[in-house]
Amino acid sequence: MTKMLNLKLKVWRQDGPDDAGHFEDYSTTVADDASFLEMLDYVNEQLIADNREPIAFDHDCREGICGSCGLMINGQAHGPQKGTATCQLHMRKFNDGDHITIEPWRAAAFPIIKDLAVNRAAFDRIIESGGYITVNTGAAQDANETPVPKEAADAAMDAAACIGCGACVAACPNSAANLFTSAKIQHLNLLPQGQAERFGRTKAMVETMEDYFGSCTNYGECQEACPKEISVDFIAMMNRDYAKSMIVNRRRLGERKVG
Amino acid sequence: MALELDAKVPPGPIADKWDNHKFDLKLVNPNNRRKFTVLVVGTGLAGASAAASLGELGYNVKVFTYHDSPRRAHSIAAQGGINAAKNYRNDGDSVYRLFYDTIKGGDYRSREANVYRLAQVSGNIIDQCAAQGVPFAREYGGLLDNRSFGGAQVSRTFYARGQTGQQLLLGAYQALARQIQAGTVELYNRMEMQDVVVADGRAQGITCRDLLSGEIVSFAGHAVLLCTGGYGNVYFLSTNAKACNVTATWRAHRQGAAFANPCFTQIHPTCIPPADEFQSKLTLMSESLRNDGRIWVPTEFDEQRAPGDIPESERDYYLERKYPSFGNLVPRDVASRNSKTVVDEGRGVGPLKNGVYLDFSDAIERFGAETIKARYGNLFDMYERITGEDPYKVPMRIYPATHYTMGGLWVDYNLMTTIPGLFALGEANFSDHGANRLGASALMQGLADGYFVAPATVPGYLAGLLGTPVMDTSDPAFTQTVAESQSRIDRLVGIQGTRSPDHYHRELGKLVWDYCGMSRNRTGLEKALAEIPALREEFWSDVRVLGNPGGFNQSLEKALRVSDFMEMAELKVADALQREESCGGHFREEHQTADGEAQRDDEHFAFVGAWEWGGPDVQHDAVLNKEPLEFENVQLTQRSYK
Ligand SMILES: Cc1cc2nc3c(=O)[nH]c(=O)nc-3n(C[C@H](O)[C@H](O)[C@H](O)COP(=O)(O)OP(=O)(O)OC[C@H]3O[C@@H](n4cnc5c(N)ncnc54)[C@H](O)[C@@H]3O)c2cc1C
Ligand code: SF4
Ligand code: FES
């Protein structure tokens, strides 16, 4: 049966990138079968009814796959439910009378756009630096000419499941993006198709990551926060490939930066 | 003024049309390609693949999306898979069979030549994606795995766990990222197209609202490709992502592009029913669940007992009863309509009496919970996350929801709209699925259009413009369009009414769902045609858009989108009224067989209904143009699933 929850919210409001920002308090009553974002929709409808500007937050699919949503809920990236993106979190995980603090991702590489919406373009820059396999449209051979061991395909898929939400960065005390970057690198590095560019890709992506994000010191908070439960093992694999790339690339490419 | 709808289907046998046409199309010399600017709007499967492929060829491409990253396009949410006529299973599949299944599944309302080409390039898509590193499911020998999907008797669906759309989109996004790095493609994110600029009889560019600064900006190009997805959110509640909208295609329509078959929408039978009035969207549960789940409702009206307490004799397994040979596996439209019938009768289940049971207890008994978990574990988890109920113990509750729109901008064989230089790809066009789309065929079509069709046909158009510079964006054609976009915004912000954009979107959605949803009749459609303009007027005098229009403003974004839905909805209903037959997803109650099945009228309605914008009184001003459909390679038959 549906239960009604009375909630006290403390929400970060910030008018723009240069505004200092502040918390505002709201109280609301919602059904426990609402999703977390439906709760915010409802608060926004109330705000509009009161002639107050609604809270800005990014979201789109509301199915945990597009990676648009992402809120710090009581200090936890994506909130209390493990392996669950903000949009999939439902209010039945909360209790009547709860106080909930809602903040945006906080990281130097993710500047705040407004309220709870941040700019995650740095992730795209990492992909552009090498997160692909070079194959022009039309140049591919029959797909079954390159068998891929099932284990490799499965492991690549585990990495490729990353939705690019940025929770790993937000949860990391160093604002490092190693979980995201390693997932993107290992998705391709684990497949036969990805071998030709393996070391060049690793070097380029790791170095672009370092241009934007902090350094990993193995806290492991990223894996805890990740809605797709991407494993930190991929970071270890990335580090190994990166170390090799220093040798392989130097020998083969004479210190040239590859991209 | 009647439009000239020349589909430009090449002559010759159907199997040779595409190859011959590619040979006949004019080419652009590699050195000249960078002199052409192509604007691609949208970065879903269709847009990302088209932009990447045109960039690789050497054109100067600009790509636009309202998302923060190209990877977030709605395509990312597709679960089930992608079809291709590879015949890796040796089970009798072929290009012809995929073509035939698609034409038949679309209830004979699509154009043969386009569908044949789709089937022809389907195999290349899989090759391309595998080479890009899409982690398709594999067998132990390392070769690609397949599953079977609704409406087909062969196993031709390729998949990547339950995240096929995500993986295909990431493949296309990565190919796009490579071109961005190479400098052939320029990315404009958080940029929402507002209008198409048409001058000298062709598309010259677009205007966009920069979602961060609020500024209206112009871009000129030699060709514009709209890859902006479907209009399912006209219903407010749908399985589409929240931001999906009709603005790009609707604005193009207002500038002269014909809008085809807007009444053709697909309602998916297995979605989770709304839980309350604040429900913001609906979640699709994979169709595959119908392989093992049995659908039923209580025989009694207003049943109060829990499902487990209802004895077998008081359950109505209505699909098994009415369709003994297909049972729970009848096609999407048949399953959806039957759910509606029993819920409307008052036999719906759940707190709001708005669903039917999908029961796995027999399957669990027969195969064991472990097997069922292996098959559907992630779906069961998703269901539990949303509803708080455990489907291993209590039957799921499901209800149909809007899922896909077959209608869209009218395009010829080259995917060009009735505005020269303006192309439409993917779900945004009407081309391949007729009145109903088969499962796993939308991903195929988006990628076929983007990787293989547009990169051949767009240059054929550009070749004729060699030596013509793009129009200067200070030309009045641009500055006037910018001024119009800006004045629409000023008007919306100036209303300062009482209700939010979402309020109006919900109201509109209810009207369209009630009268132009799963089944339609003249009285209801006429009622909707009276109520939609009234609601639109109310919207334009009472909507409340708060905040600064000169900056990031999600209320304004919504209001702009809703304002276009308000017009589009009216055309959709007018189209449904005009089509006096039942076909595919369009069921007119007046046109059914004695036992309640859809009745097509091939004599009068074997045409594409291509609407021309006439003016703001949409239902009276719009002009219907007809492209007759000719079937030379398939025999028209009535579907039967008894
Ligand atoms: C839940 C779900 C599951 C599905 N599962 C399957 C499946 O298993 N198999 C299958 O074949 N199909 C499936 N489909 C259908 C399929 O996913 C879509 O039809 C297809 O992905 C559409 O791709 P697209 O490239 O045409 O458009 P979209 O992916 O919708 O992309 C539209 C793009 O246009 C941009 N855009 C739109 N308007 C503007 C504007 N005004 N300005 C700037 N940018 C704009 C958006 O930002 C976005 O980038 C599913 C659909 C849903 C809803
Ligand atoms: S690794 Fe996980 S937390 Fe990080 S971006 Fe990917 S899905 Fe999000
Ligand atoms: S809204 Fe798409 S992942 Fe949450």
Image (cartoon, coloured by chain):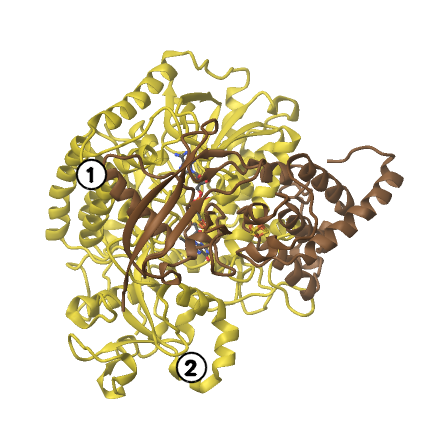
Q: Describe the element under mark 1 as helix, strand or loop.
A: loop
Frontmost residue, B607 versus B170: B170
Q: Position of residue B147 (x, y in %)?
A: 52, 67
In the rendered picture, chain A carries what hue? brown
* Residue displayed at 49% across by 33% down: B189
Indicate left or right for A137 with A35 as reference. Answer: right
* Residue displayed at 48% across by 77% down: B372
Q: Position of residue B411 (x, y in %)?
A: 39, 38
In the rendered picture, chain B carries what hue? yellow
Among the 4 quarters of the image, the one containing residue A147? bottom right
Mark 1 residue CB less than 8 A from any atom of ligand 1 = no
Rounded to the nearest angstrom, the CA distance separating label 2 from label 1 is: 48 Å
Among the 4 quarters of the image, the one containing residue A255? top right
For the N terminus of chain B, the quadrant is top left
Question: Mark 1 belongs to which subunit?
Answer: B
Query: Badge 1 local density, few (<14 within 10 Å), some, or many (20+)?
Result: some
Answer with mark 2 or mark 1, whichever residue precedes in sequence. Answer: 2
Mark 2 residue CB less than 8 A from any atom of ligand 1 = no
For the C terminus of chain B, the quadrant is bottom left
Say which amino acid is labelled 1: Arg
Where is mark 2, residue-wise?
B363
Frontmost residue, B277 versus B202: B277
Q: Is residue B91 above or below residue A82?
A: below
Question: Mark 2 belongs to which subunit?
Answer: B
Q: Position of residue B456 (x, y in %)?
A: 55, 36
Say which amino acid is labelled 2: Ala
Q: Can residue B406 be seen in this snapshot? A: no
Where is mark 1, residue-wise?
B499
Kindly indicate whether the residue at mark 1 contacts the one at mark 2 (C-beta within 8 angstroms).
no
Q: Describe the element under mark 2 as helix, strand or loop.
A: helix
